[in-house]
Image (spheres, rainbow, N blue to C red):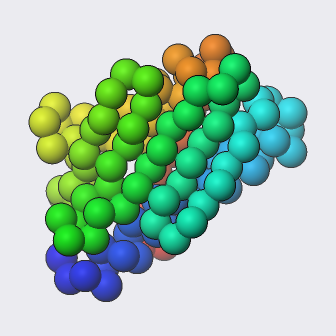
Amino acid sequence: MTDAEYTRRAHAALATIEATIDRWLDDDVIDIDTHRTGGLLELSFPGGSKIILNTQPPLQELWMAARAGGFHYRWVDGIWRDTRSGGELFAALSAQASAQGGRTLAFAPPDPAAD
């Protein structure tokens, strides 16, 4: 993958996460504050916990830090896969956000047709 492709895919993932949270705020599902600075997206949950997603351009990875630990994701076969477990980023983010938000929250990856 070229650096430009990595940047496009990584920023699409972060934008999709932000858009999902914006919908939840509009629909009064949960109050998660977001703060984005370049390739870093911070999600602040009720109760004070956070999930931080960060691009790592030199490694072409996305990193997620949550209460349960840190996770690294690399683009493999059309999805962001955990470099250790092989799990998918949006499924893992859904599980971590649900645990930290105290309710079921589901994130979906960007539409592949937009890729």
Foreground pick, 97 / 88 = 97
Whether residue 21 is visible here, answered yes or no, is yes
Foreground pick, 40 / 87 = 40
Foreground pick, 83 / 106 = 83
Q: Identify the residue at image location x=67%, y=49%.
A: 34
Furthest-front residue in view? Answer: 48
In the rendered image, the quadrant that contains the C terminus is bottom left
Image quadrant of residue 43?
top right
Q: Position of residue 55 (x, y in %)?
A: 36, 62
Q: Identify the residue at image location x=20%, y=83%.
A: 2
Image quadrant of residue 84?
top left
Up/down of 14 relative to 95, above or below: below
Q: Position of residue 72 (x, y in %)?
A: 25, 45
Image quadrant of residue 100?
top right
Label total for image = 0
Up/down of 21 relative to 84, above or below: below
Q: Identify the residue at image location x=38%, y=32%.
A: 92
In the rendered image, the quadrant that contains the N terminus is bottom left
Up/down of 85 relative to 100, above or below: below
Whether residue 110 is visible here, answered yes or no, is no
Q: Position of residue 16 (x, y in %)?
A: 56, 57
- Does 30 sit left or right of 78 as displayed? right
Q: Identify the residue at image location x=25%, y=35%.
A: 87
Q: Position of residue 28 (x, y in %)?
A: 86, 33
